[in-house]
């Protein structure tokens, strides 16, 4: 049984306030997504940006349900193969990763979409292509 699932959430993003993760989190990218009036859900620690929906820490069953109806996520540089990213891939969420990390991706390369996070002007055009 292969039912087509309607993707109602534009971005589902895992946010964690941790000394190892904070320098890798791209707040500017999220601010640009908010300007485009996209539906953005934040999982984990609260992100104080108007226009995103903070869900906090949720049960894995609820997370998988949200991933199933999400189009995209962004990948943090410090752990490209995090459990969250692997679950997103298994739930058919497209994973955006900074193109400068192309050499770090050894497995499942076709599941990642490379984007230049240093040039945020092209977000709208890039998302339309996908």
Image: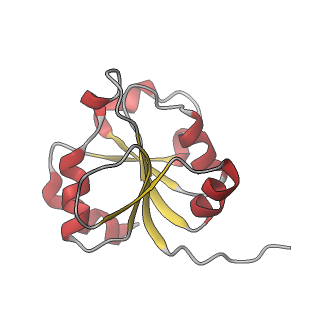
Q: Is 16 rendered above or below residue 28?
A: above
Image side of residue 34 versus residue 44, left or right: left
Split into 4 quadrants, where in the image is the C terminus? bottom left
Quadrant that contains the N terminus: bottom right
Q: Residue at x 30, y 49 (%)?
A: 47
Find residue 127 and report its image quarter: bottom left
Q: Position of residue 106 (x, y in %)?
A: 53, 27
Instruction: Judge from the rendering whether residue 26 lies leftward or rightward of residue 43; answer left or right.
Output: left
Residue at left offset 50%, top offset 75%: 8
Residue at the limit of the structure toward the top, as seen here: 20
Image vertical order of residue 24 relative to residue 67, above or below: above
Residue sitting nearer the eye, 103 or 15: 15
The structure's colour scheme is secondary structure
Q: In the current view of this chain or complex, which residue is farthest to the right?
A: 1
* The quarter of the displayed image where residue 100 is located: top left
Q: Which one is in front, 25 or 59?
A: 59
User: Residue at coordinates 61% horizontally, 58% vertically from top-left?
Assistant: 92
Q: Position of residue 5 (x, y in %)?
A: 65, 75
- Quadrant of res 33: bottom left
User: What residue is drawn where x is 58% and y is 68%?
Assistant: 69
User: Residue 51: image x %, image y %?
Assistant: 26, 67
Where residue 110 appears, x then y in whole percent?
Answer: 54, 45
Between 99 and 89, the one lying in front of the other is 89
Disc count in the image?
0
């Amino acid at each position: 049984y292969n039912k087509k699932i309607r993707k109602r959430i534009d971005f589902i993003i895992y946010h964690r306030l941790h000394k190892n993760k904070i320098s890798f989190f791209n707040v500017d990218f999220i601010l640009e997504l908010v300007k485009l009036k996209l539906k953005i859900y934040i999982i984990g620690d609260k992100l104080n940006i108007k226009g995103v929906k903070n869900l906090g820490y949720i049960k894995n069953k609820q997370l998988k349900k949200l991933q199933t109806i999400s189009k995209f996520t962004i990948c943090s540089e410090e752990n490209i193969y995090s459990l969250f990213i692997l679950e997103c891939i298994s739930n058919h969420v497209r994973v955006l990763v900074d193109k400068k990390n192309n050499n770090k991706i050894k497995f499942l390369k076709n599941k990642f979409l490379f984007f230049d996070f240093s040039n945020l002007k092209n977000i709208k055009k890039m998302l339309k292509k996908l």
